Image (cartoon, rainbow, N blue to C red):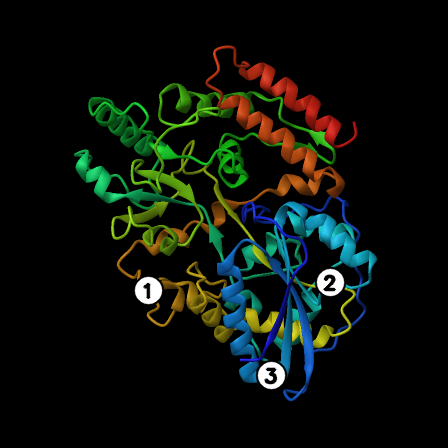
Amino acid sequence: MKASKKKVVVGGLLAAFALTGCVIAPTVGTSSSVSIESVEIGVDPSISESLKLLIPSGNSNEQTMIEKANEAFNLLYPNVTFDINFVSIPTYESTIRQFNMADDMPDVIWTNSQEVYFLRSLGAIDPLNQYIEQSEARGDYNFEEDFKTEFFDMAGDNGTYYAVPRSADTVVCFYNKKLLNQAGISMDKIQNGWSWEDFIDLCSQWRSYADKQGHSDWYCCDFNFSWSSVYYPFIRSYGADIFSAKDTVGVDTPEMREALTAIRQLVDDHYCVGSGVTSGSSFESGTCPFIFQSAAISHYDEMRELKGNIDIVTFPFINGQENAKIGAGVAGYSLCTKSKKKALAWEYLNFLMSYDGQQALATGGLNLPSIRNDLADPDNAEANWTKGYTDRNLEAYVLYDEKKIADDYYAYCDPSAMANVTLALSDVMDNTLSTRENRRNIDDIISRAVSDLNDAVGK
């Protein structure tokens, strides 16, 4: 393995690899587009060069995955070394600005389907279409046939791609079979494509069981409603949205009232822990049977209280199968516009897309479905991401791609407004989930959201 130089750009904890973006991001003119007349791909395999990579701090798994990918890349380009830099998510944008001002941008930049809007606004990353087309012409792949292209769209703009997803990330429902068995709750309804009503029925049964055991602090599900990859698909399933047009707030609708009322009812029924509650059960502690998450099954199965007791199922269909949405998104890597090694940087990104690259990432701990169709199938015995878990319902990760969305509302505002938009939506969920005696009613929550979102976009 080639030596890698590692340095921390900005310290801090990785807040979350939130899944954000949309299946096809709308074109609203909020980004500074980068126009590239032509690109050249292909480098001498004996090239002696260093690539500067920027990856998130606070996530040892990401580092391990990249190190495994780098090892595999060195089998093709043995004289390439890697200068690995780290960035904390809370300071991501300020760090990128510092790099940009110092004219010291990395060649390859980690991003997600939120921050890609910011990178585009700076003109910091290249559109990848011409690179993909030339790699396709070279015979590397047939892009439309070989990849789950909807995940490229999540970090794209109307068919223009700006990032290579490292995996196909989808929110699923984890469940604890041991707990449900102890409660005498049948798991017959827990199957891919199940309804929200089926899920709520099991929550009701668990609530009755927990109360009989004297555990009023045992909740039914870690709903993760503070996370946009859960609350945004939830409200979209009801037909609600955040913006209706460029800088035009769209939350004051009957559909939004219905969605927030449904979320609040989960708190009132004692299925969901309310905001401000400092004690309660959790999925990780083995005292809560469900959680909505996009993590690899290995993440929870390695926990002492859960090992061997968990499985996954698709996110329940909310408001009927036709209307239901499922949270998804992109974490991946982009090509810096200022890179002086674009041909090599593209070969690296192209390798991450390749069969060997995806397999290498999986051996480093990327136990989520591949973006490649030939590896995404859970029944593919050669796919490294499934190793050790072929007895679980891994199909839950890959079903219903047509229903998967991420946070496309960021495309409707200037990237400078993103932080305040996020804060306004966080307040909406905090107030909706409130258990306070004098909590705001739903109309007040929406009225305040309108004001805060208008302030965020400068109206």
Can you identify the residue that label 2 sits on? 126
Nearer to the camera, 375 or 24: 375
Q: Which of marks 1 and 3 is in front?
A: 3
Q: Residue at x 52, y 10 (%)?
A: 438
Looking at the image, residue 30 sits to the left or right of residue 380; the answer is right
The spot of residue 140 in percent (x, y) is 57, 77
Residue 350 vertical position relative to residue 198 in the rendered view, above or below: below
Earlier-in-chain disc, 1 versus 3? 3
Q: Which residue is drawn at 34% across and 56% down?
A: 394
Q: Can residue 188 be seen in this view?
A: no
For the C terminus, the quadrant is top right
Earlier-in-chain disc, 2 versus 3? 3
Q: Residue at x 63, y 78 (%)?
A: 81
Looking at the image, residue 135 sits to the left or right of residue 297; the answer is right
Count the marks: 3
Q: Can residue 309 be seen in this view?
A: yes
Can you identify the residue that label 3 sits on? 77
Separation (CA) of disc 1 from disc 3? 32 Å
The secondary element bearing badge 2 is classed as: loop
Earlier-in-chain disc, 2 versus 1? 2
Separation (CA) of disc 2 from disc 3? 23 Å
Q: In which quarter of the image is residue 246?
A: top right
User: Which kind of residue does numbered mark 1 sit on?
Assistant: Asp
Task: Tell me whether circle 1 and circle 3 mark residues in contact (CB < 8 Å).
Answer: no
Can you identify the residue that label 1 sits on? 379
Task: Tell me whether circle 2 and circle 3 mark residues in contact (CB < 8 Å).
Answer: no
The secondary element bearing badge 1 is classed as: loop
User: Which kind of residue does numbered mark 2 sit on?
Assistant: Asp
